Image (spheres, helix red, strand yellow):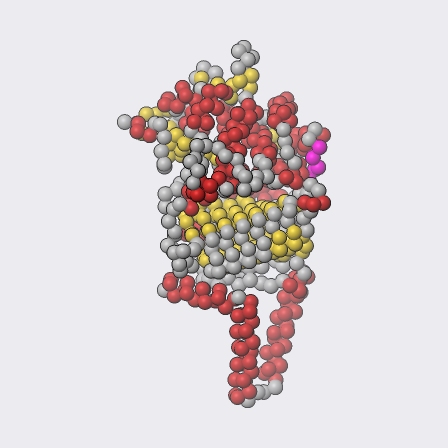
Amino acid sequence: MAEEGAGLRVRQKEKTSVVIWPNPGPLECGVLGSGAGKFTLNSLKKLLSYAKGKGEQGYPWLSYSVWSHVAKSRLHLSEELAWLFFETFDVIIDVDPKERLKFQTLLSRHTLKEDVKRKVSVDVCKFVLYLYIQNVPHLSLKAPLMVGDDWPSPEAERKHKSYEYAHFSFLKTHLSSIIDLLCEKDPDSGVDRLSLHGLRGLDFLLSATIGKKVFYSLEEITMHPTEATQSGFCKETKMFAAKQFEQWLQSNFALNPFGPLALKSGSRDKRCPCFRSDRIGRAATNLKHAPENYRNTLLHRVNKQTLAMSEEMAADNRVYIQHSQSSSIYLLAPMKAVQVEKCSRCLIVLGAVETVVKISNCENLTVVAVCRRLHISSSSKCTFHLLTATKPVISPISLQITFAPYNTHYPSLERHIQRCGMLKCNNYWNQPTTLETTSVDSCTWCVMSPECFRVLSIPFVVKGDTKDVPCPFPKEYEAVLSERKQRIHKWHALVKSVQLSDAESKQLQVSVQEKFQSWMEKSGHKKEVVDLDNMKLMHQ
């Protein structure tokens, strides 16, 4: 028998299986780092109170003009940093890609960006929560926060040393402050109450499920007859008793059942032909059992291999690439977000990424991506070929970062870009924002010299209409590419003009082939060609 309330249907046997966990997007992709500044609980309460006093310009939707005034006059932020927080919040919030596309179109038509900024507003409750999580400490994974009753074991130790667990610990520890931030004093009793608008704001940080497959908002679950009494909901006032609501939340709070830690304990995705050994590497996905908004793919310890994932396997997923070395990874799909952590000497080619590509603790990477935001943290000697709708962010401490124009294409690329709500004409690849606190935390970056620029060819056959790189190269890069083509034409003309005999032509061909094979061996590309050939054979 099913019970019904607030549009929610729950089977009787699933009444007690409410699970609430951290929404992965804000903490994984939205925290800008130590160089961006921190916000006290008191200052955020004052911001919320000030916004309410500004009427329609401040509550429930906060305009950028109101936020900019508070940020500069009260919080002592620069105009650039004030916009960075506002823009990053907009990047990570769940928005229909079609709405994102409208905003990108509006931005492209205005020469004065300030005119566009004045037209933007955000949910004020969610925005203050976004500012609050900027206080996530720079956690040392050697000494993480310990929350819970896990018995000491190698498995528990590995879990506690993950960023996912650190974020879970932060929220669990600070739930009381987070709820307090959104509460209002009852004028009669003086008791803290949480309004429905405040509760909806919590959806920014928290996700909820009943059972393993039924997903709803916090509002739907808390007002269901089986949970309303425990969650502190009052039908008369349409508000929650803050203390009781916090207790209910804490009792149901758990790790993300679809996050990287859950994927690590799953089985390998056997559709990925790169894994030739059971001893190393893992490609795991929850595609078959997770709902659309919670689909994740984990690539862990991909070492000295070539891996490719198609649109069918990675579309709309959050992708985690961890602890991989000396590999070539091609993810030719429209994705929600991509995190690359503790990888080195890899080529990573991404399709279109709707929100953020985050690079953490990496070195000697080459990343080719179309994304709304690139965020680089504690990485060095990395090169990025970008088509990005916002300025890249470089957090301390990142050194020898090189930016270059986007340099590749595949047949379905333009369709993927549109699907993620981006325009190919908006590209801020060479205008990064650096977040520095001291000279010790300095960031160094440069723009790639045109002489070093190369076009990357995708070694796969994919159906689609894109025939060339979707955004034009800057003039200085186009000139170098044209010069190279002319040199090749001149070489072909020279060989043809000397009229070599058959024996001489064969000798020249052998000599060129030997030089090419030697270069392939020294550069490491020969192994990639062998891997690609093996992948081709496995798909036949």
Residue 399 is inside the magenta segment = no
- Camera-nearest residue between 8 and 279: 279
Residue 77 is inside the magenta segment = yes
| Percent coordinates x, y for residue 151 in the rendering | 42, 36
Range drawn in magenta: 76-80
- Residue in the picture at 67% in, 52% down: 445
Vertically, is 42 above or below 350? above
Left-right relation of 321 to 75? left
**Image-quadrant location for residue 66:** top right
Whether residue 538 appears in this view of the structure is: yes
- Camera-nearest residue between 495 and 437: 437
| Percent coordinates x, y for residue 286 in the rendering | 40, 45
| Percent coordinates x, y for residue 57 in the rendering | 63, 27
Instruction: Give the main secondary structure of the magenta stretch.
Output: loop
Q: Residue furthest top?
A: 188
| Percent coordinates x, y for residue 130 in the rendering | 57, 34
Whether residue 58 appears in this view of the structure is: no
Q: Quadrant of the C terminus?
A: bottom left
Left-right relation of 459 to 107? left
- Residue in the picture at 65% in, 36% down: 37
Vertically, is 504 above or below 56? below
